[in-house]
Amino acid sequence: MTAPDIRKVLVLGAGKIGGTVADMVAEYHRLPVTLADRQHAPHEPGDRLVTRTIVDVDEETSLVSALSGHDAVINALPFYLAARVAAAARAVGIHYFDLTEDVAATAAIRALAVDAGSVLMPQCGLAPGVIGMLGAHLAERFDELYDLHLRVGALSRHATNGLRYNFTWSIDGVINEYCHPCAAIAQGQQVSVPPLEGLETLVLDGDTYEAFNTSGGLGTLCETLAGRVRNLDYKTIRCPGHRDAMKLLLHDLRLIERRDLLRQVLENAVPHSREDMVIVFASASGLRRGRFEQETRMARIQGGHLRGVDRTAIELATAAGVVGVFELLRSGRLPARGFLGQEQVALEDFLSTRVGSCYAALAEPTSGRPSATPHRGSTPAHTWPPQARRRTRKAPRP
């Protein structure tokens, strides 16, 4: 595969995730990055790589003007803007990545990618994203795959409210995945299951959690593994009690029918927190060399530093997903045009990227040497990169 010439990157959405993506591209690839949003954010003094600007995505002229002059765009805007930005990127002829979990947006982007002269790659974050790479990797390790269970949680470490939860990422994203049907495979058949159902208890490293169905986490993995697995599902990990509280709000109080009101309630009642952690867990079972076996992988990701600024676990984990596949494209290790699903990315390739160390615990244990141990202390697990400790840069303004 030929490595495309990518010299300048546009990041749309200057929130916490978008800002982390921009800094990660600048730090690890030394590329000039334009970080754009509707509102102007002051340029950080002394930052020669990240330039901030204003773009109104609802205005076609503004969007096309911003895309022009760049070789790739990473879309960190809300899910309902994904198809619009992807269509403009295809028209301009630049590579497109996003973080959406929305099934309808991904279907629209997939249709746009037919005969496209550049890559259109949605769902490049954590889930969907890295979890799809992990699922496909485990599936390949069995002669006959029976069950594949994928679990991911972005958890607040010190939630004290009745929801047992603080927001660590987008409120709109949480509501979206709690309200839409969820793809799965049951007894070899692709099915749709309701969100918030399938409640189960998980004990991971001695800690007790719950998990339940949420939408979008599998991306296109159900299609890819159709006919190759008996049972496949994705569930979100939360602290015990969270699912029942959300079911009360969504169904008993019928706020699923009034999502604008639900958003107002949650925004005013549930605090945001930067004290978080991310858990990635996968379990696969089936036949290997005629014997029934199970294999699991797990990673705990904590916050850390990037370019001298404290970052949360979900910011680092999500940004690493998209920046990792961006690196693989730029180095010629991915096809340079058309639609790409996350499971088309080899897990080993992703872990070998500059940001892959974020997920090092997911690697296959190497014989004769201990596997990576997940970090569980209160100090940051990763410094992005190690030399960032010597940097003195102000934290981004809220």
Image (cartoon, grey):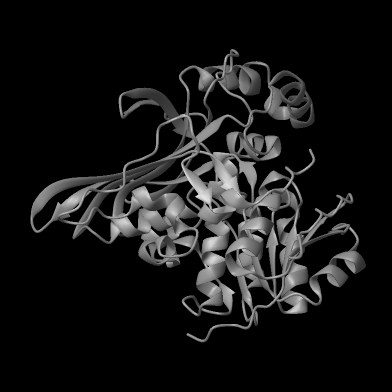
**Where on the picture, by quarter, is residue 67?**
bottom right
Residue 51 vertical position relative to residue 391 in the rendered view, above or below: below
Count how many numbered circles sit on residues in the image: 0
Q: Position of residue 159 (x, y in %)?
A: 56, 19
The residue at the far bottom in this view is: 2
Residue at coordinates 61% horizontally, 58% vertically from top-left?
Answer: 24
- Tell whether 309 sits left or right of 356: right
Above-or-below relation of 166 to 334: above
**Image position of 240 (left or right of 94):** left
Left or right relative to 301: residue 305: right
**Residue in view at x 66 percent, y 56 percent:** 23
- Residue 306 pos. (x, y %): 60, 50
Residue at far front of view = 390
For the residue pair 186 and 316, the one nearer the viewer reads as 316
Whether residue 385 appears in this view of the structure is: no
Decide which of 1, 386 is in the foreground and name it: 386
Image position, residue 69 (x, y; %): 80, 77
Q: Residue furthest left?
A: 290
Residue at horizontal 66 percent and vertical 63 percent from the top: 26
Residue 103 at x, y percent in the picture = 60, 52
Q: Identify the residue at image location x=18%, y=60%.
A: 143
Q: Is residue 306 visible?
A: yes
Which quadrant would the C terminus be assigned to in this image? Answer: top right
Apparent side of residue 115 relative to residue 222 in the rendered image (left or right)? right
